[in-house]
Image: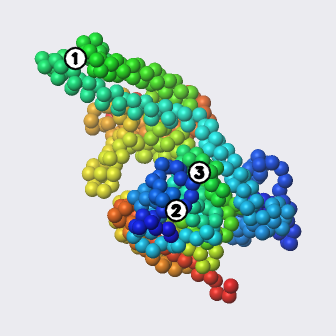
Amino acid sequence: MIWIGDVLVSRGEGGVYNERMLGGARVWEPYRSKLAALYHVGKGVELEPSLRVLYLGAANGTTVSHVADYTEAVYAVEFAPRPMQDLIEVARRRKNVIPIMADATRPETYAPIVEAVDLIYQDVAQPGQAAIAIRNCLFLKPGGYLILMLKTRSVDVRKDPAIVFDETIAALKEAGFIVLESVWLTPYHQDHAAIICTKPAKPGE
Amino acid sequence: MQSYWFGDVGEGRCSAVTGDVNAMVSRILSLSTQLDTFTPPDWQQAVACGFCSDRADYLALLQAVCIAAAERSVREHYSGKDAELLQMVRTLDEMDTVVNLLSERAADWYMVRHPAFSRKYRRTPAHILVRTMRENSRGALGKVAGEIGQLADTRTALAKEVSARANDVMPNTSALIGGLVAARLMAHAGGLLPLSRLPASAIQVLGARTALFAHLKTHTPSPKHGIIFQHRRVHNAPRDVRGRVARVLAGKLAIAARIDYFRGVAVPEFLEQAQNRIDTAGKGDGA
């Protein structure tokens, strides 16, 4: 990751959302982007130029644009039409962003498009977030990573966020993921946690 | 055999798709995939197929097709008759808020200029007050009052349009509860399809979110009604039967919304029956 002092940046064409520029690079704000917050509070997964990424819950393409600055290709899945209009605009300006209007709970609708990827980044505001990650792991290469941004309030507002967190981790382990790191994104985002997992290579492969 | 966006691959053979971007978009939107036997596409297969020349070519073609597909999906999503009605209702509600806020503020300003002025013991309708302020105030205050008047006129015109459009888009729901309230219900649900999928119990408390979550979290009494309180049968009903009337009305609205979504035309037999049931609900013999 590129740091200028203690400011996280990415190198690419600026002006996507009026972001601040620093020494010709785009400032990646932890208060706006949960992925940036993760790099501020935890280790995260080092983004590299060779990586292919499946991004679930791409929204307006703000964080997508930063991820695309670092990586080879980003498959950006978003369900709602309003943010999709912005995401398409981001894709027009960047060669490596592939916009897909689809529901992340139904990977069969975009399966013929998405390659095997090195990283799945998931930031969806829906219940059943662990199930969505598990359904999508068919795109993940053995040894690849999953970063799951858990919006505990979207799972069940009445439940204690800590319990939702534990249940999600248990579900991921059950499905064969190895949990490497799990952190809360405070002070940048409330009731949001990041869970980083890897998918082990199957024995015999 | 596997079907990918660039073609069909299987048993050592591969046939690349031909045709323009539009044809490829139609193809990927119609593909259905069995996930249990699925392996993701590989760009080298596409090259071997003769579909593209290298990695950069693969990505460029894929992006062009995906952008076109996403644009088409967005366009289809907005083509429903309810998409614009939704924005109209939300604009209307926003205008109400703005007009109220601005008139309150302007009245406070006006009272500073006219220390003897008070609204107490006077039944001055809001628009008359605004006109008084416009006529009696010089400079910016007069202009602000004028703008409030204009905004209120636009709001009235918009409300009429919303009502007319709702009668067209959701004839049954509108017949039961009025175009304006029907449109508000639809806007709260997020569209006609989501509204038609809601259970009656959810329609009953649509728009009473604060009260509902207070109930779920801290066990305060559950809300009896949300937006449907605006229907005269509900707010004119005596307190002790209001919950019942709201429940019956919500039940009929749920059916009406489904007819509106799936048939799109008014069904007189249903409407007559539903109206009778709602009318008797408040009289004690319909429990």
Name which residue type carries label 2.
Answer: Ser
Tell me if residue B40 comes above or below residue A99 in the rendering.
below
Residue picked out by circle 3 = A90
Does the image show residue A156? no
Image location of residue B232, percent across then percent down: 36, 28
Residue picked out by circle 1 = B123
Q: Give the crowd class for mark 3: few <14, some 14-19, many >=20 residues within 10 Å.
A: many
User: In the rendered structure, the residue with mark 3 lies on which chain?
Assistant: A
Tell me if residue B283 comes above or below residue A30 in the rendering.
above
Q: Give the crowd class for mark 2: few <14, some 14-19, many >=20 residues within 10 Å.
A: many
**Which of the 4 image quarters holds residue B203?**
top left
Mark 3 vs mark 1, CA separation in Å: 55 Å
Q: Secondary structure at mark 1?
A: loop
Here the colouring is rainbow
Image location of residue B242, percent across then percent down: 32, 36
Image location of residue B222, percent across then percent down: 31, 48
Name the side, left or right, on which A200 lies relative to B126.
right
The residue shown at (59%, 75%) is: A144
Q: Secondary structure at mark 3?
A: helix
Residue at the extreme top of the image, as rendered: B135
Disc number lying in front (3 or 1): 3
Q: Quadrant of the N terminus of chain B?
A: bottom right
Tell me if residue B160 comes above or below residue B282 in the rendering.
above
Residue picked out by circle 2 = A10
**Which of the 4 image quarters holds residue B72?**
top right
Disc number lying in front (2 or 1): 2
Q: Are marks 2 and 1 on the same chain?
A: no
Name the side, left or right, on which A95 lies relative to A60.
right
The residue shown at (38%, 61%) is: A189
Name which residue type carries label 3.
Answer: Val
Image location of residue A20, percent across then percent down: 45, 53
Q: Quadrant of the C terminus of chain B?
A: top left
